[in-house]
Amino acid sequence: MTLEDFTEFGEDAADADDFDDADGSVSSDRDDTDSSAGVGDTAVDPNAEAADSNVETAADPDLDTDTTSDADTESFAAYDVEPAGDDRGLGVVSVSQGLRVAEEADETTLKAFVTTGNREAVRLGTYLLVPYPDGERLFCRITGLEYAQEFQSDDATEIHARRQMRRDDFAERDYKFMAELEPMSVIYGDGDDMKRRMTDRVPKPGAVVEEAADDAEIKTGLKIPDEGVFLGHLSVGGEKVRTAAQPPTVDYRVKDDYADGDPLAFRHTLVAGGTGSGKTHASKNVLRQYLDDDRTYPTGDGRESRMAVVQFDPQDEYAQMHDDNPAIDADTARRLEREGIAHGGHDDTVALVPRVANAAYPGEGHRAERVEFTIPFSLARDMPWLVAGSGLNENQYPALLTLLNRFFRDYGDSGTYSQFLSYLDDPALKEELDESGRVHEATFDAVKRRVRGVPGGVFDQDAKPITELDHTLVRPGGLSVIPTYHLPTSRQKEIVVLAVAGLLVDDKLSNDPESDRIEETPLLIGMDEAHNFLSDADNVQARKVVQKFTEAAKQGRKERLGLFLITQDPQDIAEPVFKQVNTKVVLNLGDEDAIQSVNIPSNLAGKVPYMEKGQMVVYSPDNSEPVELIGLATCVTRHGS
């Protein structure tokens, strides 16, 4: 209960004054009555009292007659008093509400009392340090904030409510402010190095709680590597974490060497974000880091090679990575260089443009070199699902394989799609296969209809086959962009993307590859709108595609092959492929199913719908604790018009 609860105000105070006046009148009347009643009693002579007083004074000449007046007028001496030492930290560990560290998170109780001057600066998610007496430190995170009563009182009253409604200030000292902490790791010294281990000890009651302000301690506490591919800056609640270092931000990087395991590029990456969330901007920034001149990877023969990036581009945006971003001024460039962030247009960028009948590629948004190619029908020998469409069932698909094998046996790899259509028109072939029991007549007709349903003008156009452009498609340190924006139909886009991606995967996984260049070069396959090509649909074609890319994902570490999937609908990507993805970069998503599908911790998942453009959550168990980041505000290459 506060002092204010005893303070009268308003009409209540006026009533109290009236009551005092009434008491005064009664008292006066009583005195008059007593005076009247005293008539006839022995009267007190004031002269006698004065005489007595003179006698006492004369009897004790040492009596100080000024004692009373001095006591009334003399005040206490004033001294300047300053508190010893300086306050440090945000508060202290409290034991009043329990202090317990346990193996199970829900059995752990760790709270800190936050002093009045620090309360406005405290936020959920803030990283803190609690020292142990021997110099080790507990690294923890704020997971809850609450006010608690300092004094036992009932503030749900009319008087309290009206008093608060008439005032603007708030008495912080009247309340406790408690922060609930989640222990994340114990930081300790190992020689000149700083290391972390799981939380295995409880801090002392009253230990000072400080905000983590050292770059090295924060990275150690969160298991963030010092070196690697830059993704963004560590943040809490949409604000960058600030330290006492220069630069004051904490950079977040993904492991990219074999010192502590495999580079995470070959463990695969997912970038998920809705329209306008900044996922293309963020993806360009990440891909540009992989193309840095100084970034190399060991090959099978003991050499070092730069990574090749092949990016499928449905919106004609990634070829812009060839050009510099005019928004990067000299100051921004120096800051990026100081932080070791690759920037500027990538000169070795080639737009490999699929040639399709009745479609022209404008390519107006970039200055990258352009090379046309076509999809040879011979790829259907190893990838029959290119001509299967989405309607073949389990009985019809083997029939298609039989027909393709017979066709390529007769025509060789030079056989074209139009020749295959003519081949299926042969009634003698249909009769032969039916009589032999290999392909039923009705099944033959169904396959023929499906094959004819493939959009025309995709195969065997007037351009160099992609199978002969392996050295252009895959170049160490080079970026090959395959735009599909100009293709008229989604089926044409699907055939082009799956044909080229399948070619790359087959040569990477094969013991007898067609292209040594593809097999030997570290490779990252970027696929925007990945949900359109790797969906888990219930048909033979989808299952074959998913099977191929699932195998590629599983073998990626060994074959130095990474998938970089970009999507706004992560829930539509086939689960067998999705399960192989180690690093998930999640930007703003508004769909609940999409948020649940990325399977990030619930405390971060709740922030996803509210994140601004460029804010992201990174969940990479083999790299760090789950964290919130803010990406670069400026794209390191050209982006947009």
Image (cartoon, rainbow, N blue to C red):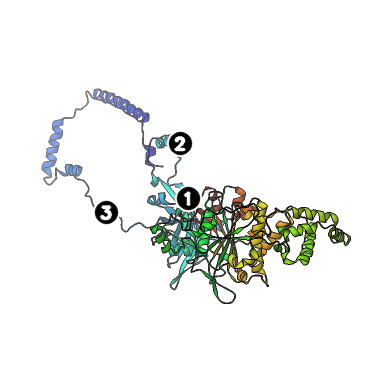
Whether 291 is drawn above or below 605: the answer is below
User: How far apart are labels 2 and 1 at the CA level?
Assistant: 25 Å
Residue 435 relative to residue 253: left or right: right
Q: Earlier in the sequence, mark 3 or mark 2?
A: 3
Q: Which image quadrant for residue 41?
A: top left
Mark 3 touches mark 2? (CB < 8 Å): no
User: Residue 244 or 435: which is nearer the viewer?
Assistant: 435
Q: Position of residue 64 (x, y in %)?
A: 14, 45
In the image, farthest residue toward the front: 462
Q: Which image quadrant for residue 559?
A: bottom right
Task: For residue 514, say whether it is visible.
Answer: yes
Decide: few, some or many residues near mark 1? Use Cα within 10 Å; few <14, some 14-19, many ≥20.
some
User: How far apart are labels 3 and 2 at the CA level?
Assistant: 39 Å
Residue 583 relative to residue 333: left or right: right
Q: Secondary structure at mark 1?
A: strand
Q: Nearer the viewer, mark 2 or mark 1?
A: 1
User: Residue 598 or 85: which is nearer the viewer?
Assistant: 598
Quadrant where the N terminus is found in the figure: top left
Kindly identify the amino acid type of the residue bearing the numbered disc 3. Answer: Val
Task: For residue 394, say whether it is visible.
Answer: no
Residue identified by numbered label 2? 157
Kindly identify the amino acid type of the residue bearing the numbered disc 2. Answer: Thr
Mark 1 touches mark 3? (CB < 8 Å): no
Kindly identify the amino acid type of the residue bearing the numbered disc 1. Answer: Leu
Q: Earlier in the sequence, mark 2 or mark 1?
A: 1
In the image, farthest residue toward the bottom: 302
Q: Secondary structure at mark 2?
A: loop
> Which residue appears at 30% of the width and 26% of the height?
21
> Which residue appears at 56% of the width and 70% of the height?
261
Residue identified by numbered label 1? 145
Residue identified by numbered label 3? 81
